[in-house]
């Protein structure tokens, strides 16, 4: 395993600092990263998300309506499913910006489902206008606890290169 993939770095004998993300140079086309732990959607977390995002969709706020339309299974808001992409943060922690999200596909996700995310590096190149950064194209997808793929999308990320950005000054 690459040294840069270790999440702890020894700064002196018996003293460690947690690292955040992987430097642009250490990504390679074809690498696949599993983002763990999974994300389980509870009824309480779904209602909380809906209220915080001001999404008052009846299938979240009206249990009678939800049962009539979907039966006993309560659906999770699609935006809440997509927000679970935060599970990629440890791997892609040195991202400057999400430049693009495309080819998004979603299948229904229900309360009680647990999603497990993975991402594959599709391409990478150095930025022509920002020498301290590089561009990654990634394909992320999620499967539920039954092994069914329920979410997939491509993203283009702007990522700091090694020894640049706020991470150098912070010591990681």
Image (cartoon, rainbow, N blue to C red):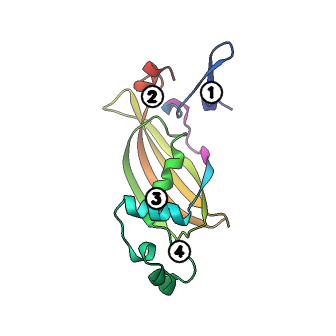
Q: CA distance from mark 4 to mark 1?
A: 40 Å
Circle 2 crowding by C-alpha within 10 Å: few under 14, some 14–19, many from 20:
many
Q: Which residues are magenta?
A: 25-35
Q: Is residue 17 left or right of residue 146?
A: left
Q: Which residue is mark 2?
A: 161
Please give the label number shown on residue 8: 1
Q: CA distance from mark 3 to mark 1?
A: 29 Å
SS for tag 1? strand
Q: Which residue is mark 3?
A: 82
Q: Which residue is mark 4?
A: 74
| Image depth: mark 2 or mark 4 in front | 4
| Mark 3 / mark 1, whichever is N-terminal | 1
| Mark 2 / mark 4, whichever is N-terminal | 4
Q: CA distance from mark 2 to mark 3?
A: 27 Å
Q: Are marks 2 and 3 in contact (CB under 8 Å)?
A: no
SS for tag 4? loop
Q: CA distance from mark 2 to mark 4?
A: 43 Å
| Mark 4 / mark 3, whichever is N-terminal | 4
- Coordinates of residue 72 in the picture (x, y in percent): 58, 81
Identify the image quadrant of the N terminus.
Answer: top right
């Amino acid at each position: 395993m690459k040294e840069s993939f270790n999440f702890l770095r020894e700064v002196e004998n018996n003293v460690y600092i947690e690292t955040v993300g992987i430097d642009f140079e250490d990504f390679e086309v074809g690498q696949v990263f599993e983002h763990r732990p999974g994300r389980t959607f509870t009824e309480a977390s779904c209602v909380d998300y809906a209220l915080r995002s001001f999404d008052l969709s009846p299938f979240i706020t009206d249990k009678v309506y939800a049962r009539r339309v979907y039966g006993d299974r309560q659906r999770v808001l699609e935006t809440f499913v997509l927000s679970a992409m935060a599970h990629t943060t440890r791997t892609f922690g040195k991202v400057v910006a999400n430049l693009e999200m495309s080819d998004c596909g979603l299948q229904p996700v229900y309360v009680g489902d647990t999603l497990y995310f993975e991402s594959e590096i599709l391409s990478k190149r150095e930025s022509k206008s920002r020498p301290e950064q590089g561009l990654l194209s990634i394909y992320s997808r999620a499967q539920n606890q039954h092994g069914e793929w329920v979410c997939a999308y491509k993203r283009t990320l702007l990522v700091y290169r090694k020894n640049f950005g706020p991470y150098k000054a912070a010591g990681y």
